[in-house]
Image (tube, rainbow, N blue to C red):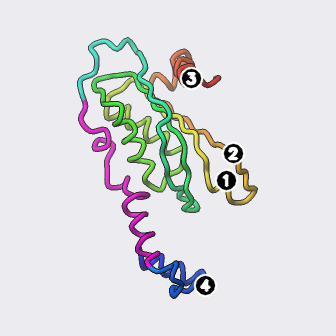
Amino acid sequence: MATAVRDFLLAAGLSLADENLAGTPERVAEAWAKEFLDGYARTPEQALGETFPGPEDSSGELVVVTNLRFRSMCPHHLLPFEGRAHVAYVPGKQVVGFGRLAALVDCYAHRLILQEELARQVAGSLARVLGSPATACIIEAKQACLRLRGDQQSDAITHAEAYEGRLRKDGALRRELWTRLGMPR
């Protein structure tokens, strides 16, 4: 990866003799491997960690964790996006600690992924791994692609939603979720 970064800098017409670029290829390669793409080294099961038996009768009550900060990279331009994820599920066969929900978001966010796919993967993994009958992931993000390129919409915030199970079909349950998020729907 460092070789590719070095070649990129040279192709851009930059001199590697510039002292500010000394070590840049290695630093960039390390940042990408250890911080931006480390999600490929984890599975959703690993991110969610230890699971615990769900309640005998959850009666469909939602577990909601909001404002999970994340950062990711767009696969189209390799530009960053960052934002907040709101994750919800109805306990099924298994539950996890709240911090594990943030780890699941990061498992997918630390990959080259579209915002829409990030929401789908989180909601789908919660349904599959925890056996949850209803899951959701709602993401608000600031996309560098939109803010810095083209029309340069510097104030734009993008939203993506994904629902699985009952939250996909049950309007009342979805309204309850949006009420808990404090967002009109």
Q: Residue at x 61, y 25 (%)?
A: 183
Could you say where residue 164 lies in the image, as x and y percent from the top left?
A: 46, 30
Q: Which residue is mark 2?
A: 156
- The answer to whether 6 is drawn above or below residue 97 in the figure is below
Q: CA distance from mark 4 to mark 2?
A: 33 Å
The residue carrying mark 4 is: 13
Residue beneath the point at 32% across and 28% down: 131
Residue 44 sits inside the magenta stretch: yes
The dot on residue 178 is 3
Give the CA distance from mark 2 to mark 1: 7 Å
Q: Does the segment drawn in magenta span residue 18?
A: no
Give the alpha-carbon distance from disc 3 to disc 4, as whole Å: 50 Å
Residue 146 badge: 1
Residue that lies at the very extreme toward the right in this rendered image: 151
Element at label 2: loop
Alpha carbon distance from label 4 to label 1: 26 Å
x, y percentage for residue 122? 43, 39
Which badge, 2 or 1, is on the more N-terminal residue? 1
* Amino acid type, residue under disc 3 in the picture: Trp
Q: Is residue 89 above or below residue 9?
A: above
Displayed quadrant of residue 129: top left
Q: Nearer the viewer, residue 75 or 153?
A: 153
Residue type at tag 4: Gly
Q: Which residues are magenta?
A: 23-51
Q: Earlier in the sequence, mark 3 or mark 2?
A: 2
Task: Identify residue type, mark 1.
Answer: Leu
Q: Position of residue 172 (x, y in %)?
A: 54, 15
Q: Secondary structure at mark 3?
A: helix
